[in-house]
Image (cartoon, coloured by chain):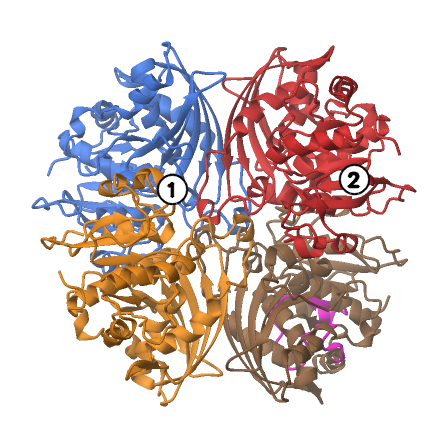
Chain colours: A blue, B red, C brown, D orange
């Protein structure tokens, strides 16, 4: 990122920094124009070592030098950070994220722990930036100085961006989704290699439930102090395949409004514009949706890094014999669907004035 | 196969014997109790060589000794064979299979060339053995001494077996199918490795059309001299994944009759019995359908050889938020879905008296 | 295995039966003509459950019915078994195997714990069946009623069989070995999939040390109460690759005796005969060594099941610019190189009268 | 590349631009500060189409816009280019490259066609930039206005860089090399996926011969009008593995000079400096050699993009029981080992004044 750095930048922590998603945070926050990492937290096993020592680095670009020498600290709110990026497992997130929020920190969490809470938003800035308004209620009702904002499950991410464009244009009625998910979605060590070499695992624990609910929350509305789910149903099959990064979803959708032809649907996708608040956010995808017209795209290996891994790639758009349209959606699961998504959310919150410099 | 060999056995040819499916025919016909290979045909490049010389053998068990020394002959009907197994590409099948049929040979074809013809049946003996009756009309109207019977596309195969059990029990209305298909389905050399290592290809030319039509023909009925398609619709997405053998299909289905609970559906699948004519057919799968109850099965690497690769494996049966039920179906694409399927068809025809010894 | 079962068969235990190698023992002991499984042991987590409940079965053929209902017991010598097959991790094997041996049991171990002990033999029946003589000294000096016999590390296995044939014919001087090893060699869950999809891991902890020592012990001699290592040196690089089963080794060798040409070396390999004591052992590989002459064999996927996974496959034999000859060796790592090897050893011991019926 | 573009840049052609290596040329020449693509050539099948139409683009970054609209032309020297990058197959390169050279063009070739000619150098600028002096003799003796310079085979590339550092420090005597090569080395479609999923191919046609000769030519010397090969021997086994990009070589080496300890060898590698002429070449790797000290590195997926894919990564340095030292070398096969290597060579030639602006 060649951008000019804000001075001073906002001090941030990465919680659970030694894991697979934590490492992505460290990579993506390298030279971030607005945020500066001041703390990296880890489990007891890591505390006391430098990040370079504690971390079995598995990102394909080298560990940034500044990160190498940071001493890993316990996952407890300090005084340094104003913003915490959480790459914690759900069970630990449930315990610890509230402590950070209570102490006045803004938590941008990749964990699923609070996504279903009625006062915690799941945010995709290009989809539902207005949902962050619920945090005022969250702070008040919980008596916190800070708050928690989550990003969706990695599989929900890309399909929700595509569904948003379709929802706006035609109003959704039914969504049928079958995923082919990358192994990195399960973290490290994650999926045993004997389960995936020459194989597919047609099951990911808890995943279908998330994929059937989260898009409806994000495409729903804040009503008073709660969310009204969007008024369509989703059926999801989720599968793990031998791909390192990039979640693919085969999507068939039925609309409320009639569509004349697939060209109309293509335009709704290709011309989708993120809400105006997205202008100038460093991680905002360019374009939001890339519609490919080749018969055999998107493909994970070739397309996952579109828009620096933040763009949602859609292809194979065609009519469906049972519903209205079908397509394939691809999204980078550890960038757009995890660390990059949380950072993008923090940028939104900063621009909205919900994080102060 | 330790079975006692019929004496004499029926002399058979394998057309296109050097390719991937042709090799499977040779492997599966080794010591077949009823059929004896007397000719292996190949393209100009192979003719004149022995099969051992001409064939780049890629089956994991060794080439049978008897096959090694057979001289590859041109793909033209001879006088030796009464039955021809066709592993030809569709374009060649279209030219050559009629020549065999005309000359009095029964052609059991794995090619797609004639599957959509109104007088050519697509047969799965455990599903629609009665459809072979159309061949009398086929012979008569075309003036052939022999006839052509086809087996379905490899992806249609397993899902049609499962759909048959469900059709019988609950009558089908809608079928959503998303496949994760093995690379061997594309033959050899087939899929380039750069397309599949760390990747998924969300497109297989012509495949979705076949998957949306063939099951309806097989689950339909012979009416006079033609087929009436079964009265439900199918939507298919087909994908290629990094699996050597075993096609998986994520299936969501809606029934005409109401189902009380998933237990009813489970029983319909697990208790499905092949029509009585299947008794004693050497290749008949045992069981026809294996219903697995673990949360993460079937898996291609672990389950594809169930019932010697002839059984249809179903798992992850659960209710569907949009339709009635969903499940995962696995079938071995080069055994049940290709060469094994054609051989099984020939066994049926022999038992039906349509091939004479 | 259609063989007639001995009556009564020898009662055996499998120690550590729920792991990857333990499962292979259960599979390979199914209908074994001489041995009958009477106990399956597991860790605290498994004890009290049936084997069907406790075991996440990852073998591609189904779990035998008799195994499914056996109650998993703690890994402690009982009164039932005369023979124990050990699939224990080295650290536990070190504690427990002596207890079994002390109590009078013969332990055929796949663990590395005792391989380097001066009174414990590493046995490949087709290579060094005479080395079992050391167990008399082992029993005496340790005051045990039973004894421990080990099989080599999975990578050492195939290369030692090939080296034995060459040692006999030409006497070895130098051996240069680079392995490409299957993921199953690391057990389950073992290698994380993120480490192996689109990747190679050029390191396997402790492996090179084993590969450089074990073949020299097996090709050495029993002298008094100890082993004299064979008088040649080995250099090993060991690598993990994305293969499910089958360890490949690129081997370059220098002989003491001059070789005229590669034909001589080919004959030494292809004509190698196992010592006479191997006759009639149910698991003895047929042939011991399969020499392939195609330019691109052996290959793990195509050749690992040669001789039911017990045969050592050698190919690409050619002269070496620095040493005398080079070749590629393939051996099935969880059959010949693990469970199958231990069972084969037990068969040898029974025929040698070291296990009584 | 944010560098300032030279004005005007040198007009260049890419020969065989639609293939896998040709595409890499197009990608790596995008915004090259010194070279500007003016022609993209292809086979009859492609001529007449735009590059965007003719090319099945398989590089993971998008096709540059300027390339998309260039009309593919036949592979024949025109008047536009001063420099031609050849991604041609060897058989075509043998016919066509001389035509370009004759017409006054400098040909930087990735093809093997002329590598063994006594007057054609194989160049790695960080190893043997002085070898380009032979081109004066080449021009004269062949009566060409231009000349041909080649870069080595992709597997020879990385190991030669490492060997150069060792040659300088300790003088080489023997080299054992076993490669684990990426599928992209075979181009597209290249290796069939059925050959590589769950498999290794222990054979690459013609590769071992190249790997045993090319490093010796590059580490040898220009003597009069010919090359004297370096005075050491190489034994190579070459294997294909399921990796998309990045060739790994397990290397064992014997020196002429004694080494005290591995630290000395480590320093020779880590401190190796490219000859001074490399200063300022846009593609010069930074660093030339990256020595990693973790026990399990380099790994293709994690390390291939070190130094933008131009750096040679060495790891696992340790002593060898037979020779002096052993190590693992990794090099990006389509960047450093192919297109990037040719471009780097052209940069060298330009700086040497052998290409005029």
Q: Is residue A63 visible?
A: yes
* Residue name at image x 41 percent, y 45 percent: A184
Q: In the image, is B38 to the left or to the right of B181?
A: right
Verify CB contact (< 8 Å) between mark 1 and mark 2. Answer: no
* Residue name at image x 73 percent, y 83 percent: C137
Q: Position of residue B326 (x, y in %)?
A: 56, 24
Check residue D159 for magenta coloring. Answer: no
In the displayed structure, A266 sits above or below D230; it is: above
Q: Position of residue A198 (x, y in %)?
A: 55, 47
In the picture as drawn, the residue positioned furthest to the right comes out as B7
Bin the neighbour count of mark 2 within 10 Å (Cα to Cα): few under 14, some 14-19, many 20 and up: some
Q: Position of residue C249 (x, y in %)?
A: 56, 68
Which residue position holds label 1?
A: D56
- How many numbered marks have been drawn onto this rendered protein structure? 2
Q: Position of residue D173 (x, y in %)?
A: 41, 85
Q: Is residue A117 visible?
A: no
Which residue position holds label 2?
A: B78
Front-most of D341 and A71?
D341
Image-quadrant location for residue B296: top right
Front-most of C34 and C101?
C34
Residue at disc 1, secondary structure: loop
Front-most of A161 and D44?
D44
Image-quadrant location for residue B307: top right
Q: Which residues are magenta?
A: C101-130
Image-quadrant location for residue D111: bottom left
């Amino acid at each position: 990122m060649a951008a000019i750095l804000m001075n001073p930048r906002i001090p941030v922590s990465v919680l659970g920094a030694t894991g697979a998603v934590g490492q992505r945070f460290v990579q993506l926050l390298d030279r971030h124009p607005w945020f500066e990492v001041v703390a990296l937290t880890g489990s007891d096993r890591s505390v006391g070592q430098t990040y370079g020592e504690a971390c079995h680095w598995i990102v394909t670009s080298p560990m940034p030098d500044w990160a190498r020498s940071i001493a890993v600290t316990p996952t407890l709110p300090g005084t340094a950070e104003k913003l915490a990026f959480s790459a914690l497992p759900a069970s630990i997130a449930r315990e610890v994220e509230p402590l950070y929020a209570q102490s006045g920190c803004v938590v941008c969490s990749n964990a699923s722990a609070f996504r279903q809470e009625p006062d915690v938003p799941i945010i995709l800035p290009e989809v539902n930036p207005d949902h962050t308004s619920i945090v005022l209620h969250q702070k008040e009702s919980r008596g916190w100085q800070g708050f928690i904002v989550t990003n969706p499950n990695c599989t929900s991410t890309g399909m929700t961006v595509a569904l948003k464009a379709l929802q706006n244009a035609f109003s959704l009625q039914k969504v049928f989704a079958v995923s082919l998910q990358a192994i990195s979605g399960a973290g490290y060590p994650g999926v045993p290699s004997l389960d995936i070499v020459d194989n597919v695992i047609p099951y990911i624990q808890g995943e279908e439930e998330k994929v059937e609910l989260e898009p409806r929350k994000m495409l729903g509305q804040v009503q008073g102090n709660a969310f009204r789910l969007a008024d369509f149903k989703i059926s999801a099959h989720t599968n793990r395949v031998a791909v390192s990064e990039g979640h693919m979803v085969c999507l068939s959708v039925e609309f409320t409004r009639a569509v004349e032809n697939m060209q109309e649907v293509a335009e709704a996708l290709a011309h989708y514009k993120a809400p105006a608040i997205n202008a100038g956010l460093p991680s905002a995808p360019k374009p939001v949706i890339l519609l490919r017209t080749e018969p055999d795209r998107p493909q994970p290996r070739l397309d996952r890094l579109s828009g620096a891994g933040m763009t949602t790639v859609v292809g194979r758009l065609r009519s469906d014999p049972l519903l209205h349209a079908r397509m394939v959606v691809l999204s980078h699961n550890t960038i757009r669907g995890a660390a990059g998504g949380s950072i993008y959310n923090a940028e939104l919150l900063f621009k909205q004035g919900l994080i102060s410099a």
